Image (cartoon, rainbow, N blue to C red):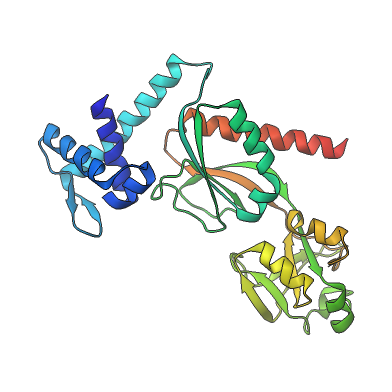
């Protein structure tokens, strides 16, 4: 058992890029990580890492051991699941990265329900709009909104996300209402900094897709902030419906070109390819799929 723990520590040091970061992710002292690493090197009779004060780099022997260590970890995980096929209990720690605004608006209740269902499982939830490095930062999976680009990640769709163009009544009174995409020239926009494209593409009522580019007045990496700026009359913005719904209902914002639509985005669960997906991560993803399916069915009934 001790050697399996040493192997797990070694993998984390390699993927985190150093002993200090590995210790933070494992929530143990740096000295404990260094000791387990030294014990493993002593038992194997090889130097696994070139270490300095800033980072660690695999030796040639360390690379071979790391490749084998990944296989050992996956085999142990598979053995544990085979011994408990009914998943009578989930244990350990599940680390998940969550989008900030969506997470606070829509994931509080499902996270509470999931935690109550698996009381022995420790949940570590990181609410942030940045794209974390799953392997490097030790996350089991991440929830992400958007169009997924080609990467080394597997993805499973959890729920559709609808985009709306909005502005405040005062803004529209000052700049004038938009009747078509030809009216964009004089309208400054508030743009989400994480958007891949520097222009907006939307579908007209006749089915034609139109691309428009506007002067950007403000950029930010948080949709909630941009929504507040739109309410203050600083510009047009395009945001997920879950962010602007309350402001629309309260009259602080109005739909712009409501007969046009944007390409639909989605909420995805993403995790590293070619890695064994643990029972706790798989249970979490399956739970969210069921949760959002039931929510959609309730909304349609």
Whether residue 27 can be seen here: yes
Image quadrant in which you'd find residue 107: top right
Q: Position of residue 148 (x, y in %)?
A: 58, 53
Whether residue 15 can be seen here: no
Q: Nearer the viewer, residue 44 or 65?
A: 44
Q: Residue at x 69, y 39 (%)?
A: 109
Residue 184 versus residue 18 in the image, above or below: below
Q: Residue at x 83, y 35 (%)?
A: 298
Q: Residue at x 29, y 46 (%)?
A: 13
Residue 190 versus residue 9 in the image, above or below: below
- 17 lies left or right of 256: left
Q: Position of residue 96 (x, y in %)?
A: 52, 43
Can you say which quadrant of the picture contains the N terminus?
top left
Q: Nearer the viewer, residue 224 or 254?
A: 224
Q: Residue at x 22, y 37 (%)?
A: 36
Give the residue furthest to the left. 45
Residue 155 versus residue 81 in the image, above or below: below
Number of marks in picture: 0
Image quadrant in which you'd find residue 230: bottom right
Can you say which quadrant of the picture contains the C terminus?
top right
């Amino acid at each position: 058992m001790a050697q399996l723990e040493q192997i797990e520590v070694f993998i984390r040091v390699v993927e985190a890029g150093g002993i200090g970061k590995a210790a933070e992710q494992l929530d143990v002292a740096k000295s404990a990580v260094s000791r387990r690493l030294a014990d493993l090197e002593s038992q194997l009779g090889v130097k696994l890492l070139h270490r300095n004060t800033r980072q660690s780099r695999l030796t040639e022997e360390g690379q071979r051991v790391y490749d084998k260590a990944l296989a050992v970890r996956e085999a142990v995980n598979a053995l544990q699941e085979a011994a408990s096929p009914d998943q009578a209990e989930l244990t350990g720690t599940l680390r998940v990265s969550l989008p900030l605004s969506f997470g606070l608006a829509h994931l509080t209740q499902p996270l509470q329900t999931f935690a109550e269902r698996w009381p022995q499982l420790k949940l570590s939830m990181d609410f942030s709009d940045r794209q974390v490095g799953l392997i490097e930062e030790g996350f089991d999976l991440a929830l992400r909104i958007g169009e997924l680009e080609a990467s080394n990640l597997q993805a499973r769709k959890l729920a559709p996300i609808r985009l709306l163009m909005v502005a405040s009544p005062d803004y529209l009174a000052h700049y004038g209402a938009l009747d078509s995409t030809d009216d964009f020239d004089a309208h400054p926009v508030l743009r989400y900094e994480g958007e891949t494209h520097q222009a907006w593409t939307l579908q007209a009522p006749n089915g034609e897709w139109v691309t428009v580019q506007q002067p950007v007045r403000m950029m930010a990496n948080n949709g909630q902030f941009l929504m507040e700026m739109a309410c203050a009359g600083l510009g047009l913005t395009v945001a997920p419906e879950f962010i602007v719904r309350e402001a629309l209902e309260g009259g602080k914002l109005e739909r712009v070109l409501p007969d046009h639509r944007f390409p639909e985005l989605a909420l995805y669960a993403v995790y590293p390819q070619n890695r064994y997906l643990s029972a706790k991560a798989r249970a979490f993803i399956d739970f969210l799929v069921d949760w959002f399916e039931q929510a959609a069915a309730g909304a349609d009934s």
